[in-house]
């Protein structure tokens, strides 16, 4: 039997994933340009409708993409993604344009 590690969460209860203060992955895209970064400052802002806030330094590529597109995506990484999360949080796409490929 295959075990699923991804479980759906009702949007109105998604704040439970953020309440304990995890580091999150923030993804953004504008046109063909996209990036993912780790962020430690994310929190539930509103329950219904569900809203979140995230703090992104103005010098990051991801923030530029969010400002250009108006959208971002949050992922709460699991333990198996520890190294990936660390790499995404320490390598800037502004310094390494091939960050995601590497």
Image (tube, helix red, strand yellow):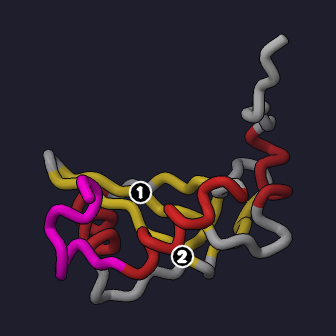
Question: As drawn, is 88 to the left or to the right of 10?
Answer: left
Between residue 12 and residue 33, name the one nearer to us.
Answer: 33
Q: Quadrant of residue 37?
A: bottom left
Circle 1 sits on which residue?
27
Q: Magenta segment: does it hold 96?
A: yes
Horizontal placement of 89 versus 47: left or right? left
Residue 75 falls inside the magenta stretch:
no
**Sequence-earlier tag: 2 or 1:** 1
Q: Where is residue 45 in the image (x, y as percent from the top left)?
A: 70, 68
Q: Please name whichever residue, 8 or 79, is drawn nearer the observer in this view of the structure.
A: 79
Left or right of 1, for residue 49: left
Label 2 sits on a secondary structure element that is: strand
Whole-percent x, y for residue 95 in the image: 18, 81
Element type where label 1 sits in the image: strand
Which of the labelled discs sits on residue 12, or is there none?
A: none
Quarter of the rendering containing residue 10:
top right
**In the image, what residue occupies the spot 65% across and 72% down?**
23
Q: How crowded is mark 1: few (under 14 residues within 10 Å), some or many (20 or more)?
A: some
At a point 79% along the width and 37% down the height, the residue shown is 9
From the image, tell me which residue sits under label 2.
39
- Image location of residue 47, percent across then percent down: 79, 55
CB of mark 2 within 8 Å of CB of mark 1?
no
- Please report the bounds of the magenta region as a residue range: 91-102
Compared to residue 3, the image places residue 29 above or below, namely below
Magenta region, mostly helix, strand or loop? loop
Q: In this view, does 90 lie to the left or right of 41?
A: left
């Amino acid at each position: 039997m295959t075990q699923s590690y991804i479980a759906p969460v009702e949007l109105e209860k998604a704040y439970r994933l953020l309440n304990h203060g995890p580091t999150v992955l923030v993804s953004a895209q504008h046109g063909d340009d996209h990036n993912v970064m780790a962020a430690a400052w994310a929190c539930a802002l509103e329950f219904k409708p569900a809203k979140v806030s995230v703090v992104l330094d103005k010098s990051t590529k991801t923030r530029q993409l969010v400002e250009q597109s108006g959208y971002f995506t949050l992922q709460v990484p699991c333990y198996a993604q520890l190294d990936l999360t660390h790499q995404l949080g320490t390598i800037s796409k502004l310094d390494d344009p091939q960050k995601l490929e590497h």
